[in-house]
Amino acid sequence: MTIQLNAVTKQVGAVTHIKPTTLTLKAGHFNVLLGETGAGKTSLIKLMAGLDPAASGTITFDGQDVTRLSPQKRNISLVHQFFVNYPHMTVFDNIASPLKIAGMAKSEIAGRVEEAAKLLQLTPMLHRRPQELSGGQQQRTALARAIAKESRAVFLDEPLANLDYKLREELRDQLPDILAGRGAVVVYATSEPEEALLLGGTTALMHDGAVAQFGPTAEIYRNPQNLTAARVFSDPPINVSQIEKRGTTAHLGAITWQLTGDAATLSDGTYTVAIHPNNILPYRSDTATVPLRGQVQVTELTGSESSAHFDVGGINWVSLAQGVHPYEIGEMHQFFMDPSRCRYFAADGALVA
Amino acid sequence: MKTVNQKAWFFVLPVLVLVAFNALIPIMTVVNYSVQETFGDNLFFWQGLDWFQQILQSDRFHAALGRQFLFTGLILAIEIPLGIIIALSMPRKGFWVPVCLVTMALPMLIPWNVVGSMWNIFTLPDIGLLGYFLNHTLGIPYDMTQNPVAAWITVIVMDVWHWTSLVVLLCYAGLVSIPDAYYQAAKIDGASNWSVFRYIQLPKMKTVLTIAVLLRFMDSFNIYTEPFTLTGGGPGNSTTLLSIDLVKIALGQFDLGPAAAMSLIYFAITLLVSWVFYTLMTKNDNT
């Protein structure tokens, strides 16, 4: 199964929600839509699901034009951020609801429901009602309904956003197994870059109603094709600054470093440099060699990582390093940047080196 | 160490005083009248449960109670479905929402006795807009001062006009609180409009509908002002509902004892029906 979008747009009144978008989403792996709230992830899913009409362009499922088909005829499933289940039906009836409407035989329905329930560990809860379940179980019920339906495409719109941390990690680990080998195109919308990296597959970076970049997840994380893609796919925010290139040297205020590879061959002038926070370390390493001395302003410690926001001559930088590094707010601290990980963009935002 | 003292009573006292003046003392006054006979001059004679027995066995009370249940049953049977239908057909967003809401709320803002007088004049055969139109233009004999059926129709229509809005507004509040995601899920499943109503909207409206039915039951069961100003209980006794009969006994005949006994029976029935209904509706709720 393949979903193909050809220059699809969505328009609500005078407002453009989706700019002309062309994408090919395939079965067999997760297709992640990554972007901030309002970037157009949900709008794009609604277009593919048939909940909203496309203003122009076409959508095909395996070559079949479905642009004008109703959601029911497209045979798709959608799991929301909210836990959407029929409130006065049991878990069994909830999972069975699309099959009943499709007019399937009772014995076959029971088989499918039980299989889906087993996969999502809902077997003991089949006769309970949604309001008797925890949030995680309610979302599992919604997922089981999507699976039992054996639809051609499964759209997951931030399905884990309303779950607490532990449940989110647990379900995220299980999701690829649950959805594997079903032949359906799996589209997963999220606003967390980390989630996109964990789920792998391919990622479409969305910004302002358009796809900034699409490709294998790890690949576009390492090689953003434009500044927008670099910004979308970074948490904490990617470090961005203007540099002057003269000869083979980059000048950022008083800080300089030698350019190598493609960057060295660029014509002299002003460029934008972007570097992920994890390539700026609080100590010198074999690769992190360019010193940045700045005043620490904000620090965050997660269990395994330390991040620091620091100020160098009015420019804010973020460092993210493995391990616990005790910073004092206000102290001057020496950080080191890895120049080989810098990406350079032209004035129009396109990657140049 | 836990110290035991009686301080808590001071905090409860204001509420107790309020409830005493608000409910207990008036009710106890009625209880007091209900077991005694008085001829004025502050002379009272102990009567025991005689009045209760007399009321419960009287045909007049049975007839009034029957009319009361018929009235309440009819207006609930009309107002609840009608309210749901109107709420379902109201827009969810946009310019027309406030227009609809204000239009809906208007009848409820009119004082009850004005509603009665309005409908009285409206339906009079000689001068009323509706009454004249029915009798003289369409030639349908319609006179609620003479014909019991016409009187009943007028009382029912008036109550539907006055109070359906309450059901509409409550249902509408229940409907707009349903997230779009539910409708999307139904669309993806291909659920029919009826299924959407039966399995999404109705369950989600259950709480507000319970409140709507309770409010309309209690209000209509205790209704006095509107039918009194409209028909005065007539023609004959045909629209004499419980409260109208009660006032006739208490103030018309000045039979304070039987009237007090009747008030307590009336109160007990209202309470019992409300309690049974509420218990049934919330029995299966776990939330």
Image (cartoon, coloured by chain):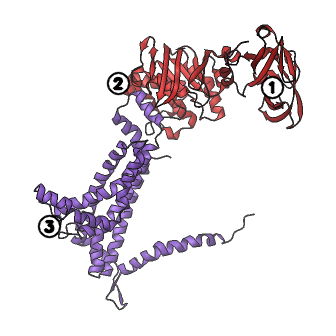
Residue at the spot of label 1: A321
Disc number placed over residue A103 in the picture, else none = 2
Residue A251 in picture, x, y percent from top left: 83, 19
Closer to the observer: label 1 or label 2? Answer: 1
The picture places residue A161, in percent across and down from the top left corner, at 60, 32
User: How far apart are the two marked residues, 2 and 3, measured between alpha carbons?
Assistant: 58 Å
Q: Quadrant of the C terminus of chain A?
A: top right
The amino acid type, in three-letter code, at marker 2 is Gly
SS assignment at label 3: loop
Other-residue count near label 1 (Cα within 10 Å), few / some / many at <14 / 14–19 / ≥20:
some
Q: Nearer the viewer, mark 2 or mark 3?
A: 3
At 43% from the left edge and 76% from the top edge, which residue is drawn? B26
Q: Chain B takes which shade in the image?
A: purple
| Left or right of residue A318: residue A210 | left
Mark 1 or 2, nearer chain start:
2
- Name the residue: 44% across, 31% down: B184
Label 2 marks which chain's residue?
A
Q: Chain of mark 1?
A: A
Q: Chain of mark 3?
A: B
Location of residue B7 in the rendering, given as x and y in whole percent from the top left corner: 66, 71
Dot 1 falls on a residue whose secondary structure is: strand
Q: Which chain is red?
A: A
Height in image: B220 above or below A259? below
Q: Residue at x 69, y 69 (%)?
A: B4
Q: Is residue B159 visible?
A: yes
Which residue occupies the foreground of this view, B219 or A313? A313
The residue indicated by pointer 3 is B146
In whole angstroms, how far apart are the C-alphas of marks 1 and 3?
93 Å
Disc 1 marks a residue whose amino acid type is Ala
Using the image, determine if residue B35 lies above or below residue B128: below
